[in-house]
Amino acid sequence: MTSQVYTCNNPNCNDLTHDHSHKIKNNHAGLLTVDMHCHILNQDVEEIVSDFTEKKTEPAILLESMGQPSVDHNVSMMADLLPKLIDIDVRLNDMNNMGIDIQALSPSPTQYYYWADRDTSAHIVKLQNENIAEICEQHPDRFVGLGNVSLQFPDLAAEQMDYCVKKLGLRGVEISSLVNNKEVSDKEFAPFWKKAEELGIVVFLHPLGTTVGNRLNQHYLANIIGVPLETTIALSHLIFSGVLDRHPNLKICAAHGGGFLGAYQGRSDHGWRVRPECQNIRKAPTDYLKQIFFDTIVHNPNQLQQLINQVGASQVVLGTDYPFDMGDANPLDLIASLKDLSHLEQAEIIGLNAASLLNL
């Protein structure tokens, strides 16, 4: 990539004496870069859950769902991953090398802990959200925050969103694709979706694992196939159940390019046309994709271009999945490889869309 030093154009950075040397590895000179998909781990939370039975049985569940080789490899990577997940200086250095101006910090999906009781979950979420808010306050020109919520208790989740947005200044929340075997489109979660729309915040949909089971416990298929499949299922339920009809102003951002939904849209539209049980929505399923935002983590320029062609450049945001190996450590190179994008479309994808979505 071409190295170039230029003036910081971060709308949150008003300090003229601030060191803007982080803007040095970006071949989109002068354009704001915002990473919508990156994670942070809270070690205090791990101490809280360490004695719970559900946490103690986690290794056995991972072994069954992923297989021994994948578990062993993940364990071997932790010495390298942990500093990236908890050390802000390490993170800032990596951001500089990747050409990322701003990260939208979200909790590691491994720390949803939807199995926790109400009081424990409230404590976990408070620790996570306040920690993320503190980091954002310390580095306002580099970070914004997405919080966790106790989605297994939708009324509590609504309260937590209100607090993390109005009191902590976070810009949205992250949720999984399934909550204790209940679809996030279930009527039980109506208070959550109502509050998210009311606050005008982004809901970042990021699965944890897969429900497919033992069929994907080899070759890391639980992540390679299973995780995007979970996103596909969740988005399909949100569309066909009418959640997006009832809440047309929801801001949903789907991880990993939205899974497989955008690449297989014809079947959803055909089902809507011919099946009566699919016709309880106001428009064709494909039309709802233009209400959803998608990150760029698809690892293939042709696939990314196809996604952009389907939903529009205005609905695509930069993502890295930092610091995990299934992410993209060079997202700007992927965007630069799309020769048909206009300068404005590049600017939208690498930063402007996320800046609007996050209310920067």
Image (cartoon, rainbow, N blue to C red):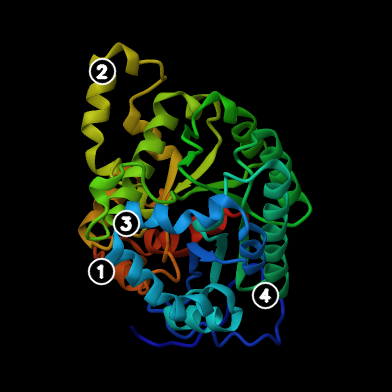
Q: Is residue 46 visible?
A: yes
Compared to residue 151, the image places residue 266 above or below, namely above
Rounded to the nearest angstrom, the CA distance separating label 3 from label 1 is: 33 Å
Residue identified by numbered label 4: 139
Residue that protrudes farthest toward the top in the picture: 276
Q: Earlier in the sequence, mark 3 or mark 1?
A: 3
Circles 3 and 4: CB atoms closer than 8 Å: no
Residue 112 lies, in percent from the top left, at 56, 51
Residue 270 lies, in percent from the top left, at 22, 24
Q: Is residue 329 left or right of residue 49?
A: left
Quadrant for the C terminus in the image: bottom right
Rounded to the nearest angstrom, the CA distance separating label 1 from label 2 is: 37 Å
Quadrant of residue 280 in the image?
top left
Residue identified by numbered label 3: 66
Q: Residue at x 61, y 53 (%)?
A: 52
Rounded to the nearest angstrom, the CA distance separating label 4 from label 1 is: 31 Å
Residue 290 lies, in percent from the top left, at 40, 39
Q: Residue at x 23, y 15 (%)?
A: 274
